[in-house]
């Protein structure tokens, strides 16, 4: 039995971590912590756990084997590193951290302490994404040439546990980064996963177009990010992350190769469409999750298997390349120049 604690009891903890841990026969939820003590206490009562006054007090409890870190972006590295040093396995929500140095420190500590560090890049686990990766690896579209991948919705103020203009996602001190870190990291990690390539160069624009604080001023982080990525084997494409899509949520990827085209979550009727020389094949493996349609993500099941040594999973080390591309994209936007991604192949 894996005994777990959850640090941060906001929306992602409430819709994914808590219910998915509770549904797993091999897990016991023992501990909760949140800055909002009343919220933590209420959820602790619901799940038969103990609410702790500080996350440090939780980490000092020797019976806890693993923790989920579901806090605001600025505290991911601090809490994850403390948990690893305390001998806990860690599932940390994305973005991994707010500086590359912190990302690398998290990976180093996991290695030094012999603990699992998983990052919640759940798009790798979506059925159509897993199938697309298989088709590309098998050469079904030939050599990938170009792509477009996007993640657009109406913004975190409709998703946050504290909705509205006061959400921490809009607070530059706590969030540090905006749509690029919230949505862009998903699609950056995903395109690398699908193609089996890394981003080696990026030309990006991060901007704030519409989202405003309660006083009417624009938020201090980006609400849109558009990147032109060059991949390690030569494929070229765009990645778009947006909090200003006031229509249907968009989570589509299209990849064009020398022998065919893959449309992934691009058609509302079919999860995956493969077109080759006029022949079309449909793979209706699942439906993509949206903020309004949360389904079993597989994240918790994979984390438990990783801790048990039954799976390799989405390790912190495997996410480093995507985080390097994110930070390079921010640099590109700041400087107005294309940026080579340091440390990539």
Image (cartoon, rainbow, N blue to C red):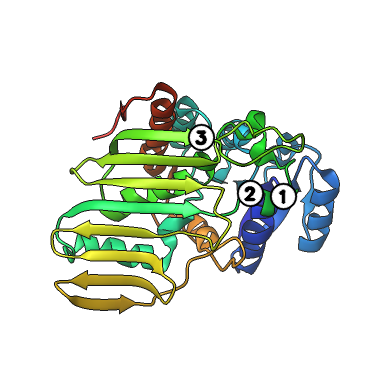
The numbered mark, 1 or 3, whose residue comes first in the sequence reads 1
Label 3 near label 1: C-beta < 8 Å?
no
Quadrant of the frame with the N terminus: bottom right
Q: Which residue is rendered at x = 37% and y = 40% of the image?
A: 227
Q: Secondary structure at mark 1?
A: loop
Residue 131 drawn above or below residue 37 = below
Q: How many marks?
A: 3
Q: Which residue is rendered at x = 59% and y = 68% of the image?
A: 293
Q: Nearer the viewer, residue 105 or 343?
A: 343
Q: Position of residue 301 (x, y in %)?
A: 52, 62
Inter-mark Cα distance, 3 to 2: 16 Å
Q: Secondary structure at mark 2?
A: helix
Q: Nearer the viewer, residue 154 or 344?
A: 154
The numbered mark, 2 or 1, whose residue comes first in the sequence reads 1
Label 1 sits on residue: 9
Label 3 sits on residue: 207
Q: Position of residue 145 (x, y in %)?
A: 19, 51
Label 2 sits on residue: 156
Q: Position of residue 285 (x, y in %)?
A: 39, 75
Residue 141 drawn above or below residue 168 = below
Inter-mark Cα distance, 1 to 3: 30 Å
Query: Where, by quadrant of the figure, is residue 278 drawn?
Result: bottom left
């Amino acid at each position: 039995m894996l005994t777990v604690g959850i640090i941060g009891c906001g929306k992602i903890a409430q819709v994914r971590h808590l219910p998915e841990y509770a549904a797993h026969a091999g897990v016991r939820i023992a501990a909760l912590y949140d800055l909002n003590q009343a919220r933590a206490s209420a959820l602790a009562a619901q799940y038969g756990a103990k609410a702790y006054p500080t996350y440090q007090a939780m980490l000092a409890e020797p019976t806890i084997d693993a923790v989920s870190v579901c806090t605001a972006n600025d505290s991911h590295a601090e809490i994850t590193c403390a948990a690893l040093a305390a001998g806990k396995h860690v599932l940390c929500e994305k973005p991994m951290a707010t500086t590359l140095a912190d990302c690398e420190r998290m990976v180093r500590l996991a290695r030094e302490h012999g603990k699992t560090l998983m990052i919640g890049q759940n798009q790798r686990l979506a059925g159509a994404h897993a199938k697309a990766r298989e088709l590309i690896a098998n050469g079904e579209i030939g050599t990938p040439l170009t792509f477009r991948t996007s993640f657009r919705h109406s913004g975190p103020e409709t998703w946050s546990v504290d909705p509205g203009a006061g959400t921490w996602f809009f607070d530059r001190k706590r969030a540090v980064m905006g749509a690029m870190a919230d949505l862009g990291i998903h699609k950056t990690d995903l395109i690398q996963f699908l193609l089996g390539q890394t981003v080696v160069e990026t030309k990006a624009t991060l901007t704030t177009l519409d989202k405003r604080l309660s006083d009417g001023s624009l938020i201090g982080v980006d609400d849109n990010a558009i990147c032109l990525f060059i991949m390690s084997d030569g494929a070229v494409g765009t990645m778009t992350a947006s909090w200003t899509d006031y229509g249907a949520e968009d989570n589509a990827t299209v990849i064009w190769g020398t022998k065919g085209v893959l449309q992934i979550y691009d058609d509302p009727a079919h999860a995956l469409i493969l077109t080759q020389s006029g022949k079309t094949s449909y793979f209706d493996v699942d439906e993509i999750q949206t903020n309004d349609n949360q389904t079993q993500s597989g994240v918790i099941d994979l984390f438990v298997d990783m801790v048990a040594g039954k799976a390799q999973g989405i390790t912190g080390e495997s996410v480093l390349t995507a985080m390097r591309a994110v930070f390079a994209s921010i640099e590109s936007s700041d400087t107005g120049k294309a940026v080579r991604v340091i440390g990539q192949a």
